[in-house]
Image (cartoon, rainbow, N blue to C red):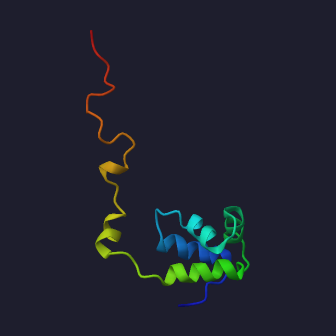
Amino acid sequence: MEPIGTGRQLALRMAARFPREDWIATLAERSGTSRESVEWHLQEDIEPPTGILAVAAEMLSSPERDSAEGSESNFLTEDDLPFSGLPGNLGKLKQD
């Protein structure tokens, strides 16, 4: 695996590897660092602390999920909609 570099570079790699996931929370929890501190380091053009880098490297080197799951995760489904499962006529105005 190539070197991670700056916090901004790390953020881009993590976002690409873990789309639609709260990878910052996982990174903060596993590194024992506050979320605010992790977010700050990810916005800077300096190398993040060793603890954050070690956890990030571990996360990035972990095996990817099943490819079928990954390909479907890019598409919205009815479960992603805020009102999924409600009857189609709910909320329509009754005409008198």
Residue 66 as seen in the image, left or right of residue 53: left
Which of the two residues, 35 or 17, is positioned nearer the viewer here?
35
Q: Quadrant of residue 34?
A: bottom right
Q: Quadrant of residue 84?
A: top left
Image location of residue 63, percent across then percent down: 42, 82
Q: How many marks?
A: 0
94, above or below 17, in the image: above
The C terminus: image quadrant: top left
Residue 84 relative to residue 7: left or right: left
- Image x and y of residue 92, in percent: 31, 24
Q: What residue is shown at x 52% (from left), y 78% (from top)?
A: 59
70 vs 35, left or right, is left
Q: Position of residue 43 (x, y in %)?
A: 69, 68
**46 is higher (above) or lower (below) than 42:** below
**Does residue 31 appear left or right of residue 85 in this picture?**
right
Asked where in the image residue 38 lies, by quadrant, the reply is bottom right
Q: Residue at x 61, y 68 (%)?
A: 29
Q: Nearer the viewer, residue 25 or 96?
A: 25
Residue name at image x 26 percent, y 28 percent: 89
Q: Is residue 59 above or below residue 87?
A: below
Q: Position of residue 19 (x, y in %)?
A: 46, 66
